[in-house]
């Protein structure tokens, strides 16, 4: 269950170019995109698109990046929650892979099967590293929730999740078009 803390405030639109991403180090996304491309080639994943989540960016800013690995560019971005770690509200990200922790887990995930869940359309996430190996059994999934807005609200913050990758309903519809059009699995990577 998501914490329903949603703030209003300043709306800022993120640019879709790597050079102007709202992060202290835009080359982090570029470097991770290159690593993602190598991983996808070596492991039979889709080599055109990957999802990179930089949770070190303030959660009122867009930090879920849809990357075109062929053109080395960010083609879309959106807001995304992080886990509350069993606190009332957590401003900064804490990571854990422990069952029941309510935290986000860093690392690479395979975007899995679609299903209709408690919050509507959702995709299973399969953790591929020791840092997120319990994701499937923890029910860490990609889904949407109305508490996540479409536009940035920095310096205010968005809601927390129980560790799920939760985006706005409109952004999930955009992601679904990508996911359903690919023949191979898509890599989702929560980078630290």
Image (spheres, rainbow, N blue to C red):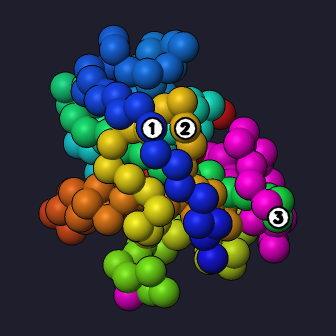
Our reading of the magenta stretch's main secondary structure is loop
Taking the magenta stretch, the answer to whether it contains residue 108 is yes
Quadrant in the rendering for residue 65: top left
Quadrant of the drawing holding the N terminus: bottom right
Spot occupied by residue 88 in the image (x, y as percentages of width and height): 79, 60
Q: Nearer the viewer, residue 22 or 106?
A: 22
Q: Nearer the viewer, residue 54 or 34?
A: 54
Q: Is residue 21 above or below residue 179?
A: above
Label 3: which residue? 86
Given contact means CB atoms under 8 Å apart, are the residues at marks 1 and 2 in contact? yes
Identify the residue at the far front of this view: 9
- Crowding at mark 2 (Cα within 10 Å: few <14, some 14-19, many 20+): some
Kindly report the distance in space between the C-alpha atoms of the residues bearing marks 2 and 3.
21 Å
Residue at horizontal 64%, vertical 66%?
A: 3
Taking the magenta stretch, the answer to whether it contains residue 11 is no
Residue at horizontal 54%, vertical 30%?
A: 155
Residue at horizontal 52%, vertical 13%?
A: 25
Q: Helix or strand or loop: what does disc 3 sit on?
A: loop
Quadrant in the rendering for residue 174: bottom left
**Mark 1 or mark 2, which has the lower sequence index?**
1
Q: How many marks?
A: 3
Q: Which residues are magenta?
A: 88-116
Residue 9 badge: 1
């Amino acid at each position: 269950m998501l914490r329903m803390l949603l703030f209003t405030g300043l709306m800022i639109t993120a640019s879709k170019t790597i050079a102007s991403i709202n992060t202290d180090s835009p080359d982090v996304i570029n470097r991770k995109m290159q690593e993602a491309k190598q991983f996808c080639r070596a492991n039979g994943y889709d080599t055109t698109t990957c999802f990179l989540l930089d949770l070190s960016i303030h959660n009122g800013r867009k930090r879920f990046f849809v990357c075109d690995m062929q053109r080395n560019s960010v083609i879309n971005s959106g807001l995304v929650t992080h886990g509350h770690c069993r606190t009332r509200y957590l401003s900064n990200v804490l990571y854990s892979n422990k069952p029941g922790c309510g935290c986000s887990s860093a690392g690479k995930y395979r975007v899995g099967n679609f299903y209709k869940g408690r919050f509507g359309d959702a995709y299973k996430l399969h953790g591929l590293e020791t840092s997120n190996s319990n994701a499937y059994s923890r029910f860490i999934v990609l889904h949407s929730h109305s508490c996540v807005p479409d536009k940035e609200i920095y310096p205010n913050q968005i809601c927390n999740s129980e560790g799920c990758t939760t985006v706005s309903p409109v952004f999930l519809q955009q992601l679904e078009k990508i996911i359903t059009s690919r023949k191979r699995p898509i890599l989702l990577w929560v980078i630290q």
